[in-house]
Image (spheres, grey):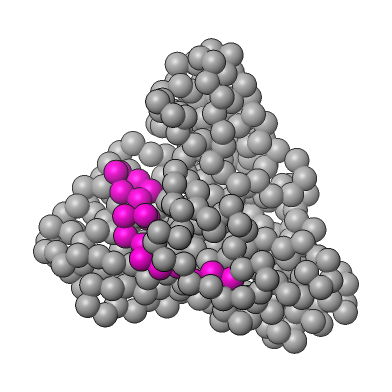
Amino acid sequence: MNRDFYNVLTDILTEERVLTDEPMKNHTTFRVGGTADYYTIPETKEEIRDTVRACREWAVPFYIIGNGSNLLVSDKGYRGVMIQICKGMNEITIEGHTLTAQAGALLSAIAGRALEASLAGFEFAAGIPGTLGGACVMNAGAYGGEMKDVLSYVTVLTNDGEFLTLGKDELELGYRTSIIAREGYIALEAVIELEEGCTDEIKARMDELKERRVSKQPLEYPSAGSTFKRPEGYFAGKLIEEAGLRGYSVGGAQVSEKHCGFVINKGGATASDIMALITEVADRVERQSGVRMEPEVKRLGEF
C-alpha cells in the first residue's frame, strides 16, 4: 500500500470509507475475485470527482462498481482503486410522474418506490440485480423493456472532471451501450419519466415477471445474470444448448442446467474457472453454429 496515496484518499473520504486489500468476492454476485488494493465508498458526486482526480494525478487505475452484478474480477484481484457507487448514493425522490434517483440506487428499490406511487413503466427492471448507474451505462433491459424507454436525463462526470447532464437524445442508447459507456463517463444521477398506473396492475405485472424469472433462471446460485450478449437474430441460451453444453463445467463453474444463458458458480468456483468456461462456450458455439458470442459480463484484472 502506498501510504501517501492512502492519506490522499482518506482526506477525501475518511478512513471508514477507504478499505485496503478488500476481497472482491464480497462485492460481486459471482462471489469470486481477489483483493482490490483500495475499495472506496463515496457519498457525494463531489467525492467521486475528487477520488477520480486523485487517481489520475497519482496514475493509479480505478474502476466504478455498483452492485457488482455484471462483473468478473480476476483471482489476482485489482491493482487499483474500486469506487463503489451503491450504498452511499442511493437516494430516490418522486414528484408527480418524475422519479429522480442517484446512480447507486438498486433497480429493485426504484421499482418498489414506483409501485408505492402507482407509477407504471419500470416493472421490467424490478428483477435486474444492478444499480441505476450501471443500467444507464448499459441501457439495461428485460422482458421487452429497457432503460431508454423511461430515461429523460442522466447526470455524468466527464473525463475532464465536469458534471454534465445529458438528455435522452444525447444518451445514444443502444443494445447494451450508450454514450456514457463509449466516452467513459461516470453516471451519477438519472431522471426517469413514468406513467400513472393502477397499483394492483403494476404489482401483478411485477409478480408475473418475478415468477418467470424464478421458474426459468438459476437464481439459487451466484451468477452475473445473462453471461452473453444476444447475438443478432439468435438467442444465446439456445445456441449454447444446441452446442451440447447444458450443464458443462470447468471446476466449480457451470453452464446452468436450468437456463443455458447463465454461467453459475456451482460451488467453489474461481474467476479463472468462470473465464475458462465462458471462453470454451464461445469457442464451441462458434464451431457449431458459426456465430461468435460476446460476453456481457465485464472482466477486471489479469486473467
Q: Is residue 268 left or right of residue 97?
A: right
Report x, y in % for residue 189: 46, 72
Q: Is residue 155 left or right of residue 32?
A: left
In the image, 42 versus 156, the foreground residue is: 156
Indicate the quadrant where residue 123 lies: bottom left
Part of the protein shown in magenta: 141-157
In the image, 79 versus 257, the foreground residue is: 79
Q: Residue at x 29, y 78 (%)?
A: 94
Q: Residue at x 40, y 31 (%)?
A: 258
Is residue 74 placed above or below 13 in the rendered structure?
Answer: above
Look at the image and say whether residue 142 sits in the magenta stretch.
yes
In the image, 87 versus 118, the foreground residue is: 118
Say which quadrant the N terminus sits in: bottom right
Q: Residue furthest front?
A: 169
Q: Residue at x 77, y 61 (%)?
A: 61
Say which quadrant the C terminus sits in: top right
Report x, y in % for residue 102: 45, 73
Look at the image and say whether residue 4 sits in the magenta stretch.
no
Q: Is residue 108 left or right of residue 102?
A: left
**How many marks overall?**
0
Look at the image and tell me whether residue 77 can be seen: yes
Is residue 292 placed above or below 58 in the rendered structure?
Answer: above
Q: Main secondary structure of the magenta part?
A: strand
Look at the image and tell me whether residue 17 can be seen: no
Report x, y in % for residue 262: 48, 36
Q: Residue at x 41, y 66 (%)?
A: 167
Report x, y in % for residue 2: 88, 72
Q: Residue furthest top?
A: 288
